[in-house]
Amino acid sequence: MLADISERCSTIEECYEFMLAYAAQGLPSDEGSPSGGQIREYLARAEQAISDLAESCATALKQERFEPAERYRAFFAVVDRDAQDSLAAIELVLAQRPISSQLIDNLNASIHFRALLTDLFLLSEIANAQRRVAKTMASGG
């Protein structure tokens, strides 16, 4: 389950990186340019990764038996709030015709999206640490 969270984190981070590049292009619309065609794809993948993130975290908590569980549950509640706020912003952007570079720049600057990214960076680091510990324990170290 940690792999699922890690994959979701990667998808959302890739979207953010693409949005940075898209915003820098100064495009008035997503129509008529190669990156314009891709922006909706990246946003849709991020939307999917975010939409089930809380459920994935809850499953990981059960399967991995993280301790202290109440600390993880509390943080996963924060992740869920930030995810829902980010999801609302992404869905609003996806509903627009056209999607300009300026619109994406504003999404990038959204405190909600940045909060979610920070949450995901923290989750990624925790997942990596958990893997290192498990590997060390398995090798008898």
Image (spheres, grey):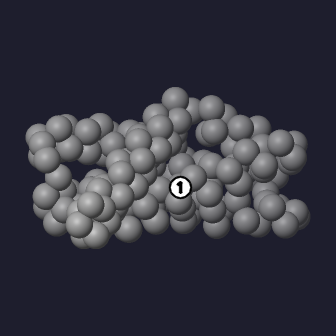
Quadrant of the rendered structure where residue 57 is? bottom left
Q: Which residue is at a point 23% across and 66% down the rendered structure image? A: 140
Relative side of 1 to 49, left or right: left
Quadrant of the rendered structure where residue 134 is? bottom left
- Quadrant of the image containing the C terminus: bottom left
Residue 63, given in percent of the width and then of the height, sits at 16, 66
Give whichever of 97, 89 is nearer the camera. 89
Relative side of 73 to 108, left or right: left
Give the labeled residue for mark 1: 12
Q: Which residue is at a point 78% across and 50% down the rendered structure image? A: 22
Can residue 103 be seen at all in this image of the molecule?
no
Relative side of 50 to 18, left or right: left
Can residue 117 be seen at all in this image of the molecule?
yes
Q: Which residue is at a point 42% across and 47% down the rendered structure image? A: 125
- Quadrant of the image containing the N terminus: bottom left
Residue 26, given in percent of the width and then of the height, sits at 87, 42
**What crowding class fits label 1: few (fewer than 14 Cα within 10 Å), some (14-19), or many (20 or more)?**
many
- Name, please, the residue furthest toward the front: 141
Secondary structure state at the residue bearing disc 1: helix
Residue 112, given in percent of the width and then of the height, sits at 47, 34
Q: Which residue is at a point 71% across and 38% down the rendered structure image? A: 105
Amino acid bearing label 1: Ile
Quadrant of the rendered structure where residue 108 is? top right
